[in-house]
Image (cartoon, grey):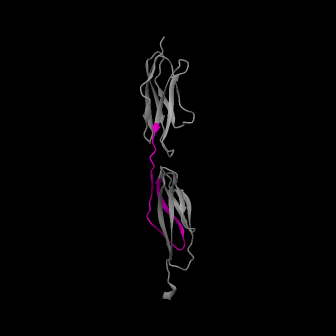
């Protein structure tokens, strides 16, 4: 009895949005599919193995890549008792998507909460550049889209306006956007005009 075992392809690249991988196996022995224990983004969804059948198919599902970086794993198909196995490498790219609406914001002396639209598939740090601006919560959270709340303190200085900004930062990708914020008085008369 001669053991026959062959997998048709050993490398697969799956798009960032995910998909399936189909490996064709020719074997005259039964086999197992071993996905690494730390690889929760690949699952086996099908197999057409039948005893005595020489050709079969192993189907693996690959989830969408939301990890923040490219990833890969080696799935082993084989029979350890017969001493046969083949590893298939599955790679999946990650493409950063990060955009912030940089339209300048204006608010009156009472302050309040402003919203900035953000679209990102990565973790974003919100960094107010002056102490009278604070990062609030997120609203309208959807699939990679949300509105970031910016809380503006009341304006008590005797000047016509003050200017600040909020920086949105994706540090790992060294990308950032800055939104200018102007707070002005509704009615302001300079002392020299009185």
Residue 167 drawn above or below residue 48: below
| Outermost residue toward the top in this view | 1
Instruction: Identify the residue at horizontal 42%, vertical 40% (top origin).
Output: 15
- Residue 187 position, x and y percent, is 49, 80
Which residue is nearer to you in this view: 104 or 8? 8
- Residue 138 position, x and y percent, is 53, 57
Count of picture labels: 0
Instruction: Identify the residue at horizontal 57%, vertical 36% (top origin).
Output: 38
Residue 88 drawn above or below residue 93: above
Taking the magenta stretch, the answer to whether it contains residue 43 is no
Instruction: Identify the residue at horizontal 52%, vertical 86% (top origin).
Output: 191
Q: Which residues fall within the magenta stretch?
A: 91-119
Residue 143 drawn above or below residue 117: above
Q: Is residue 6 left or right of residue 79?
A: left
Q: Is residue 151 left or right of residue 59?
A: right
Quadrant position of residue 131: bottom right
Which residue is nearer to you in this view: 131 or 10? 10
- Residue 48 position, x and y percent, is 46, 23
Residue 143 drawn above or below residue 179: above
């Amino acid at each position: 009895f001669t053991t026959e075992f062959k997998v048709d392809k050993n490398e697969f690249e799956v798009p960032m949005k995910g998909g399936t991988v189909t490996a064709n196996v020719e074997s005259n022995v039964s086999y197992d599919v071993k996905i690494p224990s730390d690889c929760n983004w690949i699952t086996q969804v099908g197999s057409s193995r039948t005893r005595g059948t020489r050709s079969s198919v192993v189907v693996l599902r690959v989830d969408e890549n939301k990890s923040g970086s490219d990833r890969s794993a080696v799935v082993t198909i084989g029979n350890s008792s017969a001493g046969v196995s083949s590893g298939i490498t599955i790679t999946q790219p990650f493409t950063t998507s990060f955009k912030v609406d940089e339209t300048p914001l204006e608010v009156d002396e009472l302050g309040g909460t402003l919203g900035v639209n953000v679209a990102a598939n990565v973790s974003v740090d919100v960094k107010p550049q002056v102490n009278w601006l604070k990062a609030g919560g997120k609203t309208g959270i959807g699939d990679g889209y949300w509105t970031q709340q910016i809380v503006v303190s009341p304006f008590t200085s005797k000047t016509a306006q003050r200017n600040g900004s909020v920086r949105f930062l994706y540090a790992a990708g060294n990308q950032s956007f800055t939104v200018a914020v102007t707070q002005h008085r509704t009615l302001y008369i300079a002392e020299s005009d009185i």
